[in-house]
Image: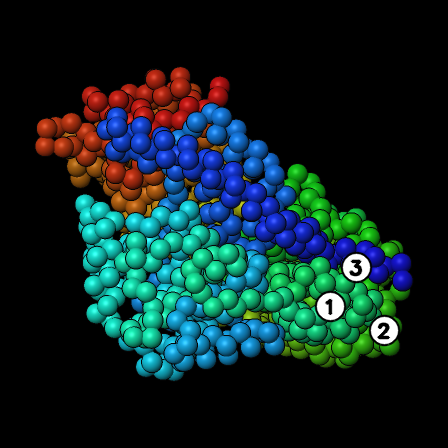
Amino acid sequence: MEFIGPILEIFKCVCPPVCKYVQDHKKLDENMKNLERVLQELNSQKEDIEATLKAEGDQGKKPRTEVKNCIEQEVKKRKYFSRARLGKDVEAKIQEMKDYYQKGCSFTSLVIDAPPASGLILPTTTLVGENTKKIVKKIWEDLMGDKVTKIGVWGMGGIVKTATMRHINNRLQEETNEFNDVIWVTVSQPLDLIKLQTEIATALKLSLTEDEDKVRRAWRLLGKLKAKKKFALILDDMWEAFPLEEVGIPEPNKQNECKLMITTRSVGVCHSMGCEEIKVQPLSKEEALNLFLDKVGRNILHVPTLSKEIINSVVEECAGLPLAIVTVAGCMRGVQHCFLYCALYPEDFPISKDELIGYWIAEGLIKEVKNVQDKYDRGYTILNRLVYCCLLESAKKGRCVKMHDLIRAIALRITSDSPLFMVQAGVHLQRFLGQQEWRQDLEKVSLVKNDLLEIPSNMSPHCEILSTLLLQRNRNLQRIPECFFAHMHGLKILNLSYTDIEVLPNSVSDLRNLRSLLLRYCRRLERVPSLAKLLALQCLDLEYTAIKEVPEGAEMLENLVSTVYNGSVANTRFYSFLRIGEVNKSVCFYRCKICEREDVTIVLPKDVRGLIMRDIEDVTSLNDVLSKEQGLVNAGKFSHLKALCFSYCPNLQKLFSLQLLPALQNLEFLVVRSCKRIEEIVEVNDEETQKELGTSAITITLPRLKKLWLSFLPELKSVCSDNAVLICNSLQEIQITPSCPKLKRLSLRLPLLDNGQPPPPPALEVIKIRKELWESLEWDQANAKEVLNPYCKFEQS
């Protein structure tokens, strides 16, 4: 029972504490009346200011009530939780408004999105609660009858007034021809009748000109709406009443058979508009619980440590507000499995963010996006959310996360039944767990960081739904029996990194659902079985192993997007995820020999998007890489290249020659850093080029280059030689960071106007450089520096 309190706290911190938000939200409703009184005083001052401005002829300024904007517009636009935050500050806002009154400030109003067009089917949610069903029935009867012409639906925020009215709107659009037109308008805050006229006109596809005054607009709208004869007008989220005739809305009555519906938080608005008042009530306790369970998943009731009383206490904090319940449940459902995954690591263990997100992707926990880059971005968003909710802690300068001991204990309790985890991580385990301990309904097993010596020869757990098996950091583990994986056909992740495994059993080849096979730092591992059947494999890590050849069948794996081999492997295909823009399929050479070994054949995917060279001692140019692949004649086959990154290549002298230019026409990112011998980026002084071009000026065009980053290049003198210029009209960013002391020429050629003067590059956003270096640069065009100077963001020395 000692865990019940902390478990309840987990529920409360999955999103910011619900009880506080509900209290603040209620307080906001209560204090808005006080705000209205102070607003009247401020509005009076506003009218005086407007009159003064008009007298002075300053027609360009339209003072508004900024504090009213701040409160009312934010209440209108934000979700329930965001609006609730205002409640706790409402008294301070009242005082702030009084301060504004004393100062006599003038303000500007904010812009609100245009309303949806007439006749649009609007997105909605499933309506829950008997009261809501009765309200829908009541509204529908009033619409179809002739006794009620104006309907006002009111209630506190987050109680799905808008969703209810959207349901009515859609039903009118789909089920009946009762009205000639159904018009939906979201009322902007603060109330601006001219803007409201514009929004209604937009819904009616009526064009109003800016020079028309409010009276003229009202007359035209009135004519348009009367021509409709029988219409239904829905005004959503009203905060103030107004005379219909001032806007141009004909008064609904039995004769014209028109109907007006509004939603508001104030019963006073309903009364002032002469509406039939319909109040939306909070959900009952039973309805609230059912909605919560439907959204979070009813299997939560089977978690032993979470009694129905505990779950009820969480739901009660939402005060029967559907939006609050759906938000809390959605948060829990969205991150619950990602959060529980962290319990697979040892206590107090720093968990690599990239490793963790890689597991989530392999497990299929991030389904909203297909792009690899977007999946990692989504993973980081989830991690930040978990840290914000105090379910995880940041570690190692933000590169890792940790789980607090108490939180981990609770997560392990949750995973002791459904989903079922078996976790014996970091407990100095020497004996492998017995067959009876491997239950058939196991979903994840972690034996990370133990002292396991061997797996029994007859061990073959029947775990068909097991998706994750983590055995890394058992440094003395040398052998896995052939039968061990025979009944693990659901396995998606297998991690044996940092073990003394010498050979993998052939049964690994039959794990057709395997997506991630991690064998990093298995220094004795010399062979892996055929990968030909592992068609789902996405990530293969063989770095720092004793493997000498690319595994059989690797070339058949189309889904393999993350592969790292040891530098000594012949026929090597390398991969490293490159988080630049939209580049996803990238090849990385890291600490390996390229030119010195004749038996090394470089295999690059034909649609490779990024090429990274890091810590390569023998490469002198990009030509060394692509010429060994297919020869310079076929360089155009790499025209998909979007990113090039060379770093810590001590013998790099020139990045590429003109012969490789056809392969770089789609290049968007060019990064060169910490290469101590490079003098030029583009080599144009070779004998072949000189013979072909003679003394003619050479133009180098990289039409799609967006970012050029150069850093720590002590011998770099220019981007290209004196007899060449670089044209990059798509260039957005230039970064030249420290230690490029000899750089004298960027070689950048700007286009010329008819008057012969260079204009600013059309896409350029920023040049990051040290001021002293910028001042020393030489330019071919006389006014180039003056044109580019406004884009400079000078770095600190």
Q: CA distance from mark 2 to mark 1?
A: 13 Å
Q: Quadrant of the N terminus?
A: bottom right
Question: Residue 107 is drawn in which quadrant?
Answer: top left
Mark 3 and mark 1: span between their CA atoms?
22 Å
Percent position (x, y) of residue 730? 29, 42
Query: What amino acid is at disc 3?
Result: Ile
Question: Which residue is labeled 1 in the image?
Answer: 444
Q: Which residue is mark 2?
A: 437
Instruction: Classify mark 3: helix, strand or loop.
Output: helix
Alpha-carbon neighbours of circle 3 within 10 Å: few (<14), some, or many (≥20)?
A: many
Q: Which residue is mark 3?
A: 7
Nearer the observer: mark 2 or 3; the answer is 3
Q: Do callouts 3 and 1 mark residues in contact (Cβ within 8 Å)? A: no
Q: Residue at x 52, y 62 (%)?
A: 154
| Tag in front: 3 or 1 | 3
Q: Is residue 371 visible?
A: no
Q: What residue is shown at x 29% (from left), y 73% (from top)?
A: 256
Rendered view: 209 above or below 700 = below
User: Which residue occupies 25% across, 66% down?
Assistant: 225
Q: Residue at 43% x, 28% y: name it.
A: 105
